[in-house]
Amino acid sequence: MDTSPIDSWEGVGAYFTFADQPGVVAFLCGLAVVTFVGFMYALIKHENDAFDKHEG
Amino acid sequence: MTPEELEAFKAAFEMHQAMNVEVFYWWCTAIMFMIHAGFLAYEIGASRVKNALASGMKNILTLAVVVPTFYFFGWWIYNAFPGGLIPIDASGALPWAASMGPDVSDMGTGIFWAAFAMFGATTGSILSGAVIERIRMSAYLILTIVVGSGVWILAGAWGWHPDGWLLLDLGYHDVGASGVVHAIAGFFALGVLINLGPRLGKFVDGKAMAIVPHNLPMALIGLMMIIVGFFGFLGGCIIFNGGETGWTTIYGNPTNLSAFAFNTLMGFAGGVIGAYLSSREPFMTMSGGLAGIITVAAGLDLYYPGLTFFLAVVGGISMPIVGKFVEKCGIDDAVGAVAVHGWCGFLGVVLVGVFASGYPSVPEGAPDITFFGQLLGAVVMCVTGFVPGYGISLLLKKMNMLRVPAKAEAAGLDLVEIPAIPYPERVPSRDIIEGTVPADAAGLPANGVLGS
């Protein structure tokens, strides 16, 4: 996968993966947010399951 | 030397200067991790054995939730809200901006973002200690995101930004974050504690019982590690400028690390001595080191070290007294966070108004430091911390999401939700709880509660 926004290192500014594709960057940012929310969901589920199990 | 050679030397010098700036904040951030290592040890030690790992897990996850959320919106809040509650254009601080990733032309944003994210995680850890042994992990993490990536950095935009309204309108001076970090986090914790309620067994017939740490030596070592981390924290509060400017505070006035060194160490010593005088107790005495530094942090660049020492002694003496008062009010602050961070943070900001009035502000039109400006600024910090802490924890309480079930709390959170055992080769809390080993045989009270 060609993710490079640059062809050479001369006069480079932002050079992170997909820096020249704002839509992809926004998508990846959204993906990170969704992943984080998924973590919080998993944590809450684990917690509720643990308490339910302990309550019997 | 030819003009071309001179230009080349100048370019090389400027590049090295920019690299030095990065190096300085890189290591400040690394040292700030020691704060979190310290909180980890301190809160594990301060918990009863049945909650040791659950308390530690909270600390580990604190960093893991504040860092990404500070990336998603925290840094933007700092840049967008210096004027109050109406945002200005700060599109360069949004997470998809060019400067929010590897960028050869930007040698500042990443390291400042990282240092500020660590400040945010510190506010979460301050809350963490206060609420141990009965808060739901999920509720704690939600509250940590709010304070660590939202509330403190909003206060930072107001009182710790070159265009912050507290600076421009009041001459607010809080160089070491007594207000924007410590008062905010301490009063946020107070708001949460009111809704959370005390641990089971903390108050019997209205009388406060001592719930003792299961590992006081570990708690003391953790506190000392926090002090080590403070050198990164306070280093991150000073601005390493390029060009001919040299060191300045975040408000633009000249200072240097020597000033910080004098007053950080004198603040630590004074706080320890003060807390010893009023408590004689090792946990409080060691906490006094934090209390002393926090009490003098707002004026760290201005005070004469002898004055610093005296003020830190006052902070150290008053901290356990305030802690006792909080307890008398029926609030179970397990580690004294409200007293150490809330009270001493408030006191620190006000003391600048008492002892450093008249120092000029750098921004054009900004007033000098005044008692009124500092007092109002301190009140703003306390209210800005308390209101969201109280409001959001109340909402979580109404949704039955704030506190663990009583049965789980009595059994211990390690047993209920942590798939690991802290001390498998000593008499474990599990056996005491399940009744296979009598508590007295283990030499421990069954629930760790001793009469005070």
Image: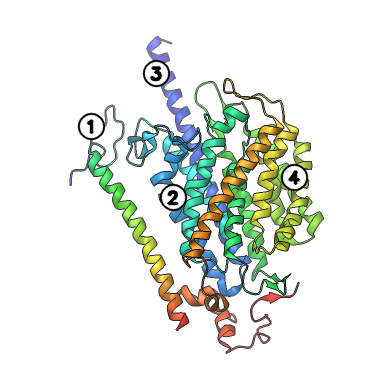
Badge count? 4
Helix, strand or loop at disc 1? loop
Q: Distance between the residues labelled 1 and 4?
A: 56 Å
Helix, strand or loop at disc 3? helix
Disc 1 to disc 4: CB gap under 8 Å: no
Q: Residue B236 vs residue A34: left or right?
A: right
Q: Residue B171 carries which label?
A: none
| Foreground of the two, A9 or B446 | B446
The residue that disc 3 covers is: B8
Q: Residue A6 vs residue B160: left or right?
A: left
The chain ID associated with circle 1 is: A
Look at the image and tell me in which quarter the C terminus of chain B lies.
bottom right
Among the two numbered marks 4 and 2 on one chain, the one whose residue lies closer to the N terminus: 2
What's under tag 2, amino acid-wise? Val
The chain ID associated with circle 2 is: B
Give the residue displayed 50% in from the left and 42% down from the top.
B115
Disc 4 to disc 2: CB gap under 8 Å: no
Dot 1: few (<14), some (14–19), or many (≥20) neighbours within 10 Å? few
Q: Which residue lies furthest to the top in this view?
A: B2
Percent position (x, y) of residue B11? Answer: 41, 21
The chain ID associated with circle 4 is: B
The quadrant holding residue B88 is top left
| Foreground of the two, B339 or B266 | B339
Q: Distance between the residues labelled 3 and 2?
A: 39 Å
The residue that disc 1 covers is: A8
What's under tag 4, amino acid-wise? Ala
Q: Are marks 3 and 1 on the same chain?
A: no
What's under tag 1, amino acid-wise? Ser
The residue that disc 2 covers is: B67
